[in-house]
Image (spheres, rainbow, N blue to C red):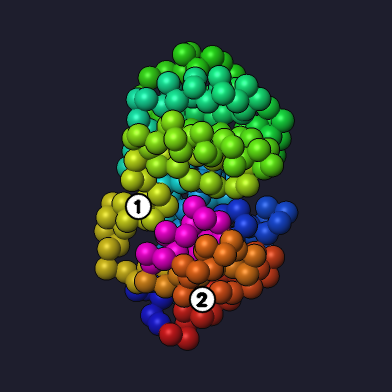
Amino acid sequence: MDFSKVIIMTDLDGTLLDDKKNISERDLKSIDEFCDAGGAFTIATGRGYSMAKPVADKLSLRMPAVIFNGSAVYDFKTESFLWQSEVTYRARDYIKAIMREFPDIGIEVLQQHKVYVPANNEVESMHMALENVQGVFCDVDEIPEGGWLKVLLAYPEDKMDGLRRFVDECCAEGTNRVLSAPFFYELLPVGVSKAYGYKRLLEVTNNTDRFTVAAGDYPNDAEMVKSADLGFAVSNAHDEVKAAADVIIGSNNDDPMTHMIDYIRKL
């Protein structure tokens, strides 16, 4: 296939990034060759701006990216938001209800360039430390109005089912809810997903005529993988993503982008 007709969007953690959070040199070379031949390559991640930027810089992204699990399209070259969608105004009340029911919860409220932490726990502390993000620790009522792109709930994996049941019963109106990791449950704007963000990116970059490719590993990637013209799942992917994919390739530790690009080349 002519690469100039193709756009690839890939998830980061568990897909493009290996278990050590690195991108293989072989994949970096393959991505550069794909882009040099006219292909469009970008990322779709649940990470916010500050957590996505180091990866975007490593890739020297030539295209805008989907961040905040689909709530925004961001151009790292011009450092500008091209599109965004905000969480319902009821999210503040939802957070208060969740904190009353689960006093040991960890919570992030993500705006464009800031991460507010109205509730902290071990899972949240580890997350902030791993990604080297400086959060603003404050009461939920101290978080500025508007511009909430997502709310992340951090909770131990063995307790997550109970949290999800409560959130789905009490915080459903006006939200889309996704499990982005075994210990992260997120409140997004209603209707928003990585698939939705992919569509908005195609529109704002005038690439709606390209052949779309998507790759992922976790349930929050499944809709994006299924809706693309060609969907890939890495071998370490959740069964839901494998079921949504057209092709299953090697694991995130096995140069997945190289194998994916080679597959496209042969079409």
Where in the figure is residue 227, as x and y percent of width and height? 37, 64
Q: What secondary structure is marked by label 1?
A: helix
Q: Nearer the viewer, residue 50 or 159?
A: 159
Residue at 45 percent of width and 64 percent of height: 225
In the rendered view of the protein, which quadrant contains the N terminus? bottom left
**Residue span colored magenta:** 214-228
Residue at 65 percent of width and 68 percent of height: 251
Task: Decide: is 181 above or below 151.
Answer: below
Task: Decide: is 265 above or below 99.
Answer: below
Where in the figure is residue 249, as x and y percent of width and height? 59, 74
From the image, tell me which residue sits under label 1. 196
Q: What secondary structure is marked by label 2?
A: strand
From the image, tell me which residue sits under label 2. 247
Mark 2, Cα crowd under 10 Å, few <14 / some 14-19 / many 20+, is some
Name the amino acid type tagged 2: Val
Examine the image and state in which quarter residue 184 appears.
Answer: top right
Name the amino acid type tagged 1: Tyr
Mark 1, Cα crowd under 10 Å, few <14 / some 14-19 / many 20+, is some
Residue at 48 percent of width and 45 percent of height: 178
